Image (tube, rainbow, N blue to C red):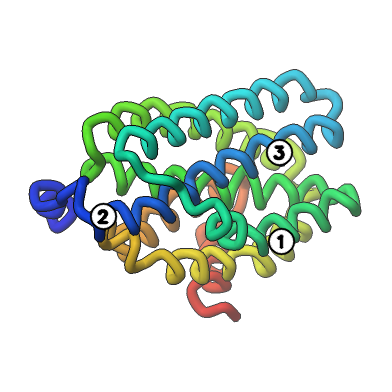
Amino acid sequence: MPQLEASLTLDFQSDIYKDAYSRINAIVIEGEQEAYDNYQQLSGMLTDDKDKLISLSKMESRHKKGFEACGRNLKVTPDMGFAREFFSALHRNFQAAAAENKVVTCLLIQSLIIECFAIAAYNIYIPVADDFARKITEGVVKEEYSHLNYGEEWLKANFESSKAELEAANRQNLPLVWKMLNQVEDDAHNLGMEKEALVEDFMIQYGEALSNIGFTTRDIMRMSAYGLTGA
């Protein structure tokens, strides 16, 4: 497996590795901050689940601190300006949906797209991570599944009333994932993570989430095509 072979040859102290890490580490830190903010906002929109959502947001805050420690361990300063720009399109779409009280769109962006993106990235990163970061990331990825599960369960319970908005939100937001992956392809490669593996893992996670919510295999294939083709 190319990923495992890469882990044997990576030099965690090299300038090339650290330069790439400054952006990838910033992305995971900013991703956890976005998730914290989004769950806090959702707690005001879904008041029946307020305590659960605040609990999820606090978990994201802990994850952020863990990834900040990963950067310090390698003596790398995360490029937070790059990371904020990286998430800017999803951030704008979430805020626009929240302003219109579009809970379904907000859940698709945070609980499905961002969580599946994170889980895929962490799954592909763990085999090639340094020992310190591997332990942190293994702990984080277990908890991310509970966040994905929250969105799945809510959308499953409200599937019929949510389906049209979910499809529209998917059409608007899934193409952004491919732009984001393309943007970090070289940096991910320098950390031993191949884009094809990231894409495959994301599609598996996202497809399973859509299936659990209630979409058919045919629906999922059609919805996934929006990401791959930008159609």
Q: Please say whether residue 120 is visible from this viewpoint.
A: no
In this figure, which residue is indicated by the disc labeled 3? 37
Of callouts 2 and 1, which one flags the residue occurring earlier in the amino acid sequence? 2
How much space separates mark 2 and mark 1, taking CA atoms? 36 Å
In this figure, which residue is indicated by the disc labeled 1? 169
Residue 211, image x, y percentages: 54, 49
Secondary structure type for disc 3: helix
Eye-nearest disc, 2 or 3: 2
Q: Quadrant of residue 137?
A: top left
Which residue is at the front of the view, 37 or 142? 37
Residue 221, image x, y percentages: 51, 66
> Left or right: where does residue 195 sit relative to residue 45?
left
Residue occupying the point 25% across, 60% down: 16
Residue occupying the point 67% across, 50% down: 108
| Residue 17 image label | 2
> Left or right: where does residue 43 sit relative to residue 65?
right
Q: Amino acid at mark 2?
A: Tyr
Which residue is at the front of the view, 14 or 42? 14
Of callouts 1 and 3, which one flags the residue occurring earlier in the amino acid sequence? 3
Eye-nearest disc, 1 or 3: 3
| Residue 93 image label | none
Q: Amino acid at mark 1?
A: Ala
